[in-house]
Amino acid sequence: RSFPAAGDMNQVDVSGWEVRHACRMLAQGNPSVLHCLHSPVDFKVTPWTGELRAMVRRTLDTSALALAWWKHGRQNWLKYIEKKEEPIRKKYVHVLRPLLCLQWLLQRDCGARDGGPGISGLPPAPLLELAREVAGNGDLSDSELSMVEGLVAQRESLPLPLAKDRALDGLVERLLLSGEAKLAERGVSNSNSDRHPLDGAGSEARHAQWNRLCIAIVEQMSAFSVESASLDEL
């Protein structure tokens, strides 16, 4: 649900999922739920928040997450920009963020495979901070980083339908091709097959762990609901 901007407050978007659905998506490495779980701002948490984050660290399939980010960026590109004469300028943000998240992830995941420290947490939420980290590891040139900085700086233009930015178009196309090639190197197909990257070896064990955690959360929440109902009757 979206709450429109009012006074000094920016627009606020609120997302929520039923716990079983949320656990299923976390088991599959869904980027939207992962970002909510790892938000830099905690408005309200429960002991289960730490349990969910710990489970993600133990079971996250980085290939599944990488593919999800690539597909998200490509779908936004095709739907909101490629075939539009005057796309909403902010749609470039919605395309670039998942593609830069993909580069960020692959940089760190490759380091882990080579014996480095590996992945800790998720990419930074602010687009500019994300772009600077990716550039710092050599996957964005200085000129490309300047494009992203220019996009973020022109806040008043973001809600407007404007002529395409050919330089940004070129950056998006390069990131799509680069991401596709790097996924192929990992043996991850970007086809529309129904087969999920988690299918195969290790999948059942991951889903079993998530299933046990989900059952524990549901049982505690159900017990809390029963207890609250009993108190209301007093």
Image (tube, rainbow, N blue to C red):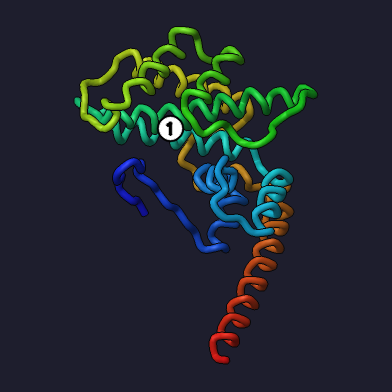
In the displayed image of the protein, which residue is found farthest to the bottom? 234
> Where is 166 relative to 219, above or below?
above
Q: Residue at x 33, y 51 (%)?
A: 3
- The answer to whether residue 176 of the structure is visible from this angle is yes
Q: Residue at x 54, y 29 (%)?
A: 102
- The answer to whether residue 196 of the structure is visible from this angle is no
Residue 164 point in image, percent of width and height: 25, 20
> Where is 61 relative to 230, above or below?
above
The secondary structure type at the circle numbered 1 is: helix
Residue 152 location, quadrant: top left
Q: Residue at x 36, y 35 (%)?
A: 76
> Where is 96 relative to 233, above or below?
above
Quarter holding the N terminus? bottom left
The amino acid on which the numbered mark 1 sits, given as a three-letter code, is: Gly
Q: Which residue is mark 1?
A: 73
Say which of 78 and 230 sits in front.
Answer: 230
Residue 19 point in image, percent of width and height: 56, 62
Residue 209 location, quadrant: bottom right
Residue 191 falls left or right of residue 136: left
Residue 28 point in image, percent of width and height: 59, 48
Quarter holding the C terminus? bottom right
Number of numbered callouts drawn: 1
Say which of 233 and 114 sits in front.
Answer: 233
Residue 208 falls left or right of residue 80: right
In the displayed image of the protein, which residue is found farthest to the front? 8
Q: Residue at x 50, y 45 (%)?
A: 32
